[in-house]
Amino acid sequence: QVQLVESGGGLVKTGGSLRLSCVASGRSFSNYHMAWFRQAPGKERDFVAAIRWSSGSTNYADSVKGRFTISRDNAKNLVHLQMNSLKPEDTAVYYCAARASNYYTSRMQSYNYWGQGTQVTVSS
């Protein structure tokens, strides 16, 4: 049974940084894509970033390019999202997701497994 558990959210001021972590367990993720999505109050869940577990290749939403970095730690089955230069519009619940495919997509519906989410709040 796949389980994803996020941590690292919190309250930060504009321009600050946070690092989110996602522990993945339950199987080998060597043929998976891992991703981060976020959902602000009253809005749809949006794609943030994805990483192919085997190669480490990455994709980002335009809104976070140059500010966020997704990475993985194979030995510990961890996926990180380093968020720098945070803005109030980055405020959302951030979700870790896993897709059983080596092919990238930003479509939420294509991800098979989800964590419970972690709140990120950026104050102005």
Image: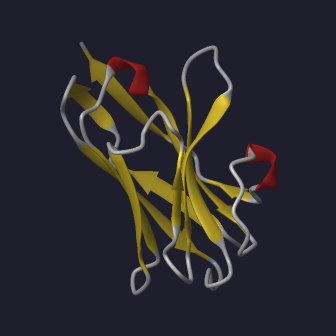
Quadrant of residue 44 within the rendered picture: top right
- Answer left or right for 78 relative to 14: right
Question: Which residue is outermost to the right?
Answer: 109
Q: Going 39% across and 51% down the picture, which residue do you hit?
A: 7
Q: Is residue 40 above or below residue 47?
A: above
Quadrant of residue 3 within the rendered picture: bottom right
Residue 15 percent across, percent down from the top left: 19, 28
Residue 28 percent across, percent down from the top left: 63, 85
Q: Going 65% across and 83% down the picture, which residue do you hit?
A: 27
Q: Going 38% across and 32% down the picture, which residue do you hit?
A: 120
Foreground: 23 or 90?
A: 90
Residue 119 percent across, percent down from the top left: 42, 33
- Answer left or right for 58 relative to 69: right
Q: Is residue 43 above or below residue 52?
A: above
- Answer left or right for 105 relative to 91: right
Residue 63 percent across, percent down from the top left: 47, 33
Q: Is residue 77 above or below residue 119?
A: below
- Answer left or right for 48 relative to 29: left
Q: Going 71% across and 75% down the picture, which residue do you hit?
A: 102
Q: Quadrant of the C terminus?
A: top left
Quadrant of residue 78 within the rendered picture: bottom left
Q: Is residue 39 above or below residue 111?
A: above
Scheme by which the image is coloured: secondary structure
Q: Quadrant of the N terminus?
A: bottom right
Foreground: 68 or 121?
A: 68
